[in-house]
Image: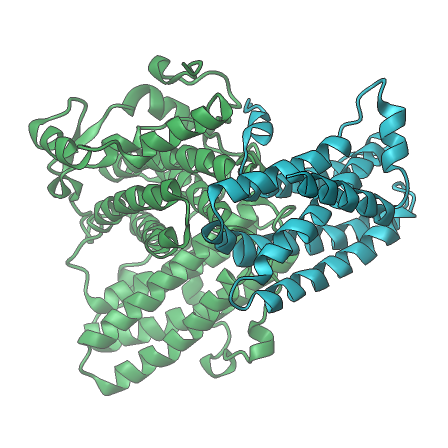
Amino acid sequence: MAFNPLEHRGIPLDDQLRNWGQLDVAPVDPDTSDPYTKCRIIAMNGIEVEAIMFSHHFNRICPDLEVKQQLAQVRFIEQQQQKVVNWLLPGQASVLETTISYEQVAVDLTGWVARQEPDPYLKQAYEFGLLEDFDHLYRYANLYEMIEHRKAEKIIDQLTEAMPGRPTRLHHRHPMDNIREPYDREAAAPMSKLHALTIMAAEQQTMNFYMNVGPMYMEPIARQLYQEIGLVEEEHVTHYESLVDPGETWWERLVNHEYNECYLYYSFMQTESDPRVKGIWELHLNMELEHLHIACDLMRRHDGRDPESILAPSLPEPVTFEPNKTLIRDLLATQFDWTTLGTGYVQEAHRRFEEYQDRINAERPPSDQVMEDHQHKFGEEYRLETEGPHPVQSQRAQPYQ
Amino acid sequence: MSSTTKGQYSSTDDVIDLLKAQHGQIRDLFDLVMHSEGQERKEAFEKLVRLLAVHETAEEEIIHPMARSLPGGDGIVDDRLAEEREAKEVLSELDGMDPGDPAFLKSLDKLRMDVLTHARAEERYEFDRLRDEFSPAQLKGFAAAVRAAEGTAPTHPRPGVESAKKNMLAGPPAAIMDRVRDMIRDARDKD
């Protein structure tokens, strides 16, 4: 049955406030919970953080007192939603374990979106970024075994492989080359707008997370690796946010944000394996339906347009966390050595790229160092290759010299 | 499939790194006990109990006294000892149970969360701060002491010497801990 969020009212805003006891949610099990449940928690946290920060930015440019008050009310509830969602993560998990789950999100959420995206230019943007997050997972997995003496497959299970993607040292492009062309808000499929917002929010949360947790490590190699990958996340946020049409009005953007939250809570409610967590997705969906309704009213009033004119008549297929191994192996075989030039992609390294690389990689990048340190300590690198040898000949595991 | 060896475990000579590696091993052993049956579960559980005994005793003898010298160290260590007491109670409860008993897994789960919470607290409030307080030589010396205790209390009994080891490590967890304590003190006194 197609679900149209505009046809449902949800919980009245006045009834959405939760007390401290209701906010004090029990975390999921650090060892036995479904890795994709953790991925859904992390992805949804990113969506809520984006909703909150978008609303704050709107508040800062909005002169209308009544609108500001309305935004503040919804925003406080969204903060409570973020608290409940992110507090599902267990305190026993280390920062690095959570990081590995963040990269699993980046890989399998972007992989799903890349497969569903109808627009070829947008699809290319997701495929390009995917191969980089895939490499981050591999580097962090090696750091994890070095510091915590456990294998990343204890966290990601056999759902996502951990092997080289496009090498992290090659992710450092001239910032000019990280800007993409936006979709056209008049012509783009509603689904494409949701995809762009979702991946932008997920990468932004990853960027913020690394910015803040990186210096909590004492091990020099950990501190360095978080810096390097944190800077790649800056590139990714730039890459994905520039896909969104900057011509969208603030009202339109507000509606898109609320609609996207409905979409993701609905999706996760449909696909969640943990019944208790599923209950939270359902509750939050019922809250978001009301937030969407309020946003639609604001758009009608202040933008003079019907939200129906920019939204799909029903939600697309539920966003699903599932393995993307075939897609990733196909992309590795075809796009492994790509980079960007202007707003497009090239296979050959170009001058601006090489000059930038020479400067930033003038000293050995931590993403290379972590592999050498791991090999030195363990005699070989950590990999999880469930589907056979690496599709790129030069990236197959070599015995350590 | 991944193919990393266990080489690091025997190669590390920093006591913090060694104890962290044991935390990883302990967690993996819980996983094995949960996901095995019959004789395999019984053996995995015995292995887990021995490793826990060696590990916790080593921490009590080496880490916690070091941690007491940190600012606020007494409070931190008292909190850790309270966690350990709680875990030990569940452990002795489990020790008398049949691993096939449905209640076994329930108690095991309680122990698993207790131990994991305790281990993470040690890493955050003790290990991370201790590394700064002691010289590499000291950290290495303590690693040798833990290793000595482990050497006499192997988690993998070898064929042939099994009966001797069994003699040394038979009995309830509390008895194993007492013996490991003596071994560590002996090892430390020799330095």
Q: Residue at x 35, y 65 (%)?
A: A51
**Which chain shows up in green?**
A
Which residue is nearer to you in this view: A110 or A164? A164
Give the quadrant of the C terminus of chain A.
top left
Q: Is residue A236 left or right of residue A247?
A: right
Asked whether the viewer can see residue A90, the reply is no
Q: Is residue A203 left or right of residue A15?
A: left
* Residue A355 higher or lower than B178, as above or below: above
Q: Residue at x 18, y 47 (%)?
A: A182
Residue A149, quarter of picture: top right
Q: Is residue A218 left or right of residue A56?
A: right
Please name the color used to draw chain B: cyan
Q: Position of residue A142 (x, y in %)?
A: 45, 33
Q: Is residue A78 left or right of residue A186?
A: right
* Residue A201 higher or lower than A103, as above or below: below
* Residue A23 higher or lower than A100, as above or below: below
Which residue is nearer to you in this view: B105 or B123? B123
Q: Position of residue B142 (x, y in %)?
A: 60, 42
Residue A88, quarter of picture: bottom right
Asked whether the viewer can see residue B183, the reply is yes
Q: Position of residue A151 (x, y in %)?
A: 55, 34
Q: Residue furthest front?
A: B190
Q: Residue furthest left?
A: A351
Q: Residue at x 89, y 37 (%)?
A: B170
Which residue is nearer to you in this view: B96 or A49? B96
Q: Position of residue A73 (x, y in %)?
A: 38, 80
